[in-house]
Amino acid sequence: VDNSYWQGSLKLNEALRHVLISFTSGETMREATALWLLLGFALVTALAVVRLWRAGSAGRRTLLYGLTWLLIPVAATLALAAFAPKFNPRYVMAALPGLVVVWGGGVASKARLKIEDWEDERSGPTAGVALSTQSPPRVSSQSHTPRRFPIFNLQSSITALALLFLLSTSLFSLGNWFVDPAFRKDQWRELTADLRQRVGPEEAIVLVSGHAWPVWHYYAPDLPVVRLPDIDVLDVDAVLDFADTAGPLRAALDPLSDRPGAWLVGWQDDVVDPMHVVPAQLELAGREKGMDSRYWGIDLRRFSQLKTNWIPDAPPVEVPLDVTFGDAVRLLGSNSLDNGDLLLFWQLLPGGADADLSVAVTTLDAAGNTVAALPPRRLAGYVYPTFRWSPGRTGVTYLAAADWLGPEPQPGEHTFRLQVSAAAQPRRPLPLADGTDTLTVGPIEVVID
């Protein structure tokens, strides 16, 4: 079984949309813009098809050749993806030359102008002689024929517009690669160069996810890292838990050191650590230091004064609750970290095994004023819905201080209210044992260090 993608069904319309955009505007065009440009590419393609069809047997053979090259690989790959729904436009990139053949043949088929467009404006016995070595001279029936230049020919104008459209969109797409920040490459080179100068002898580097190891080894083979999880290929089922990561983290840190630290490098960590287990462990064991450097596509965090025996190997429930929502899920408890972040710990019940559960959070300060109201979100993050939880696993809701305490988090006593609902009935929260649908927790003391 290929675990490098989430199981599900192929969305054919989405796959075709991505193929069309990749084959026309390319990967460096924002989708909203690329969708509008598809209208222009459709006109150019229709023009090319009509011209090739009307160009005789040679043009029709070219059209058949190009369409065969274009459509068969795409159709075959999509048919295969219907059984194994893993798809990326690069899987069908071998079909792109077929579209180029259609465009090129169609645009060029009418570029050769008719002979009469080159008639000479001279009068006399040589009037109207075509400037072509392939046709015999023709004598104009009129004494004077005005000269017509190809640039004013309708077919030539259409050809020029088609070429201008293809060229301008190509240049625009290429320009985005260098101008639009959304298409920057992940800055591995810059990050590793900076870490090489800044990592201390008592600090470890933690790489989440571990399948980024080949990229890391290319740029920094001299910098050892702790890979969490220790995998070579992305595995969407290798979701980290406290028991999985405590051992490798403790082994990487020197327990006899006075000031052990760790640099946490995150790349696709939302897939393997959607519950933010590793940052929570490092925060509980030490203190996070501020960072003045940012790297495109990669997260970098620094933790200092880590105590290895403080790294939890089980869910660190600080406030036990043991509250059941319907027959779907049980809230085991919560923990407010020293940086203001909040952890909620859940245990899935048999009634919620196939449900997609979400939690809504409303926070009140000591005076009873609402400081934050979060709309429903999946318990353990968007990419880790409850129907993917393995049996017996404790799920974690990680709420950053700026989310559940408002944009300017303040320390002190706070109370929060929870409502749990299923995606099938989002407007009907699951009931508690007393028949109500809202759980109030607190007041709890919030510390922001």
Image (tube, rainbow, N blue to C red):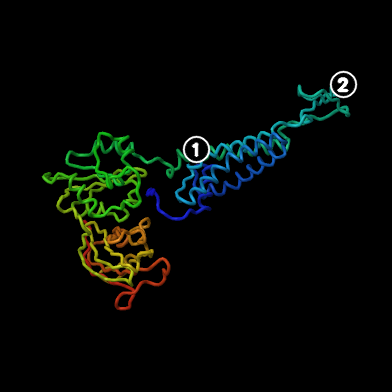
| Percent coordinates x, y for residue 285 in the rendering | 18, 53
Q: Quadrant of the C terminus?
A: bottom left
| Percent coordinates x, y for residue 314 in the rendering | 21, 58
Helix, strand or loop under label 1: helix
- For disc 1, the marked residue is 174
- For disc 2, the marked residue is 125
**Residue visible at 57% across and 41% down?**
70
Left or right side of 419 for 412: left
As drawn, 405 above or below 191:
below
Q: What residue type is labelled 2?
A: Pro
As drawn, 138 above or below 447:
above
Left or right side of 421 for 77: right
User: Label 1 vs label 2: CA separation?
Assistant: 54 Å
Left or right side of 307 for 222: right
- The answer to whether residue 375 shows anywhere in this view is no
Q: Which mark is residue 238?
A: none
Q: In which quarter of the image is residue 207?
A: top left
